[in-house]
Image: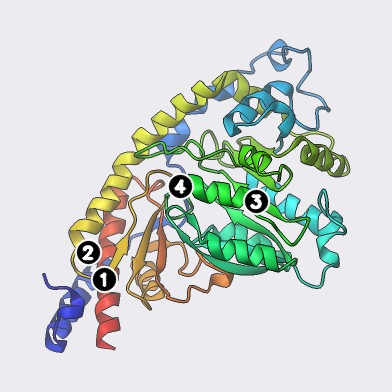
Amino acid sequence: MKQYQEMTREELLTQKEQLTQTYSRLQAKGLKLNMARGKPGADQLELSLPMLDVLSSKSSCVTESGLDCRNYGELLGIPEARKLFGEYMGVTPEETIVVGSASLTFMYDCMARAMLLGVLGGEKPWCRYDKVKFLCPVPGYDRHFTICETLGVEMIPISLSEWGPDMDLVEKLVSEDETVKGIWCVPKYTNPLGGSYSDEAVRRLAALKPAAKDFRIFWDNAYAAHYVYEDTPVLNILEECKKAGNPDMVYMFGSTSKITFPGAGVAFFAASKANVDFTAKQLDAQAISWDKMNMLRHVRYFKDVDGIRAQMDKHAAILRPKFDAVLSTLEAELGGTGAGSWVKPKGGYFVTYMSMPGCAKRIVSLCKDAGVVLTGAGATHPYHRDPEDSYIRLAPSFPSPAELAQAMEVFCAAAKLAAVEKLLA
């Protein structure tokens, strides 16, 4: 098949007629499928069910140090959990706080506390500046952008490749503008591209020379162990910040949301000991303790980092056929058409599709009208403004294989139809 861009108008009109018929047939099926968010499938959730039985008696709720996890106390998390998840993040227990069930909640809290109370080394709370800006690599995670928009933080888009953000621009903006207070980073299996930051990108981030003394890297390592095809290593940002003389510049976040149970996992925060101590003082006004029973449940179930890795091997085995199905369908249906391109991720939860410019919103709308819900076009950019109207995030994890096949049939038909319509226009 010729690329759509090479077809005559008559050929495009013929294609449109055929594609419209195909789309109408799919639309008539009355599907109700959802590929909007990176939710684990039911088979993945089954993996962690045995964890619910590890605390079955009064004595099993007591830690090795004699702490009764049913009661108040240990605001920074039980020692066993700080040790396990500190090791998972590549830091010491003293550089770790284990909190509630969602790292996104703690990211919001860190941003809100910075706005209200400031950060270590800052002269005043961020809300007392006329303007606060954050650098946002794109395509990126819509929830990060929502936090900034909700708190009135101006977002500056930064181009992101599979290997990291445009560091020349990052270094320029950070060094010249003291209103730039931070940058969002998803370093491993970047949401949604699925690549990982290169050693050079991590080292250049760690060596930044911000005009703002209270600048922070928000390092959302949500997919630290979530490989699908290849477990790619990423340098430890806290260690690199220490080497560069910027030990307090980074906040690291992680959770077990896609390891055990979303919404009922364990979240953790890592930073320099000075940052941890400073944050602990702020937390003392916010909480008395977190869910220590859940912390202990996770520790007893996994035992060590090798236990977490073994769990992730099982997740990868479930996810890989789903990603294979999406990627093979894209290649079979759209390869060579010129309708768009896509990235084969090494891990994470998404496949990124880049449509012909000006087609993403139309594709999402066509899919919705045929019963397939996708993440909204523009969600990968601040303020939902994708200047090319091109990026679409596909989430293969939740549907069953049969549902996934149906959803991708609709998606590919929509992508073709939108591309032909665009060229005819």
Bin the neighbour count of mark 4 within 10 Å (Cα to Cα): few under 14, some 14-19, many 20 and up: many
Q: CA distance from mark 1 to mark 3?
A: 35 Å
Q: In the rendered view of the protein, which quadrant contains the C terminus?
A: bottom left
Check disc 2 and report its element: helix, strand or loop.
helix
Q: Which residue is mark 1?
A: 339
Q: CA distance from mark 4 to mark 1?
A: 26 Å
- Indicate the amino acid at tag 1: Ala
Q: Which residue is mark 2?
A: 334
Check disc 3 and report the residue beneath it. 218
Residue type for callout 3? Phe
Q: Amino acid at mark 2?
A: Leu
Vertical position of residue 422 compared to residue 161: above or below: below
Is label 4 or label 1 in front?
4
Task: Please tell me in which quadrant of the rendered image residue 89 appears.
Answer: top right
N-terminal label among 4 and 1? 4
Task: From the viewer's perspective, tell me whether residue 378 is left or right of residue 123.
Answer: left
